[in-house]
Image: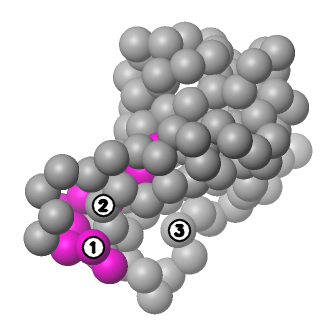
Amino acid sequence: MEYLRTVDFDTLLGTDARVSQALLDARTGATSCAVSCVKTPPGEGSPAGLHTHQVDQLFYVLQGTMTVEIEGTVQRAGPGTLVVFPAGVPHRNWNEGPEATVHISVVAPVPDGTLPFATPVATT
C-alpha cells in the first residue's frame, strides 16, 4: 500500500483538456472510498450532464469557481468550498469561469466497477 499519494500538477495543468487523476481507487487498495483530483477547463463540465450516483460524492474546490446544480438549485463554489452530492441526488457541475477549476473528488463507498458510475437524469 502506498500511503502518500501526490497529485501530478504539471501533468494535470499542462493540458487544455479535462483531466482526472486517480489518487486512490479499487486498483490501488481502496476499500472504503475513492479519491481523485480533477481539472475542468472553462466551458466544460460533467461528462454525463445531469446525473446521479449510487455512492456519495464530495468535491473540495482548490482552484477556480465551479458552478453546480443540485436538485434543481444552481450555486457557485469557489476555492475552499466542500460540495456534497448525496447518493441518488440529481446533480451536475460545470465551469463558467475564465480559468480551469481544480477539485478533489471523494466517493464513498468505492464504486462497483461492474456498474456505470453515473446514471443520466432526463431533463424536461
Tag on residue 28? 1
Which sits in the foreground, 107 or 121? 107
Residue found 33% across the figure and 47% down from its top: 6
| Mark 3 surroundings within 10 Å by alpha-carbon count, few (fewer than 14), some (14 through 19), many (20 or more) | some
In the rendered image, which quarter contains the C terminus?
top right
Three-letter amino acid code at disc 3?
Phe
Which mark is on residue 24? 2
Instruction: Work out how far the residue at label 3 is from the one at label 1, CA to CA, in angstroms.
Output: 18 Å
**Residue type beneath disc 2:** Leu
Judged from the image, the secondary structure of the residue bearing numbered disc 2 is: strand
Residue 117 point in image, percent of width and height = 53, 68
Q: Are circles 1 and 2 on residues that touch, CB within 8 Å?
A: yes
For the question of whether residue 18 can be seen, the reply is yes
Q: Which residues are magenta?
A: 27-37
Identify the residue under disc 3. Answer: 117
Give the CA distance from mark 3 to mark 2: 16 Å
